[in-house]
Amino acid sequence: MHDSEARKKGQAQYKKLFGEERKPREDDTALDEFTLNHLFANVWSRTQLSMPQRSMITVALLAALGRDRELKRHVEGAIHQGITHEQIIEIMVQVAHYAGWPAGHNGQRIAQEVFEEKLVMSSPSEYFRPGAGAVIIKDRDLVLTFRRSDTDDDVWQCPQGGLNAGEEPLEAAYRQVSEETGIRKRDLKLLRAYPEPLAYELPPCDRSEKSGRGQVHHWFFFEFLGSDNAINANNGGEFRAWKWVPFQSLPCSVVPFRKHVYEHLYEWFRENIRESGAEKLDNGLPPDPA
């Protein structure tokens, strides 16, 4: 096969794998050319394995070898091939058992980074970051609030944060509570889920590629079953203090751009949980696994 034909075939396979042709660079070497003309033209084109199968094999090998840069690119290729987040994480489970736990965990970390990047839209002005929040209640009307550590303002909030790739909102809520407050899942009783996501816009000075224009959260109401001694405001580094406050007063203590969210949460809590008796209500969710 002539070089021009090999290059054309290699480019076709490269585009099929990654969704775009490989762009020539000024620092390309003979090895780069050979990669396209041989590896992609003659190996990736073989029909004994499908391209998704070869993609998964390549992801596993690169993770086992610790080739981070190449692994990131091939995770992107696997996603383009329709390989799911769950399948890629399962590959890392296999890698961990056959190539060692550090290799598996490192591969999982890189895969998560790629999936998180895929969640970020190219235009921050149009993007609302998805997340989950937790309203933790005791004595029917007291809510657990936290003061942020990154500001001197006397503002308070409930635990909240972004979704990891492939993570369900309820799982994210439990994770955020554990990471930010030290409260364990077994010390929380799920009462209800707010019926729809609630969004807020960030001030322009606080917007970034990661946060976008604002955030939209799935909210969950929990009854606190544990001891106050288990609450650690410094557990995740985001907070500096905690306190129980009457839920009705909380909207006046949050930053202004979040106030409407907490007003909605309080009104819904008052009408659907406190007034009705939370312990008698079906939360509308599947049974919570132990």
Image (cartoon, rainbow, N blue to C red):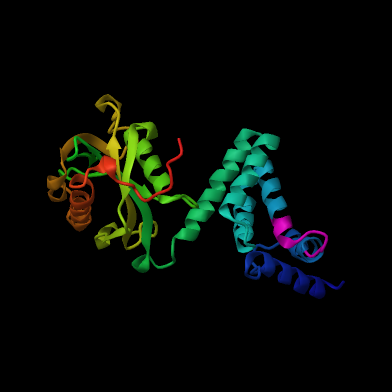
Quadrant including the C terminus: top left
Of all residues, the one furthest to the front in this rendering is 280
Residue 185: horizontal and vertical position, in percent?
Answer: 38, 35
- Residue 220 visible: no
Q: Who is closer to the viewer here, 224 or 97?
A: 224
Picture residue at 17% right of the left edge, 55% below the top: 256
Check residue 51 for magenta coloring: yes
Check residue 118 for magenta coloring: no
Q: Residue 198's image quarter? A: bottom left
Quadrant including the N terminus: bottom right
Q: Who is closer to the viewer here, 129 or 9?
A: 129
Side (left or right) of 113 relative to 142: right
* Residue span colored magenta: 45-55
Please determine whether, in this image, residue 248 is positioned above or below residue 209.
above
Q: Who is closer to the viewer here, 154 or 173?
A: 173
Residue 104: horizontal and vertical position, in percent?
Answer: 62, 39
Picture residue at 17% right of the left edge, 40% below the top: 141
Picture residue at 33% right of the left edge, 55% below the top: 217
Residue 211: horizontal and vertical position, in percent?
Answer: 35, 57
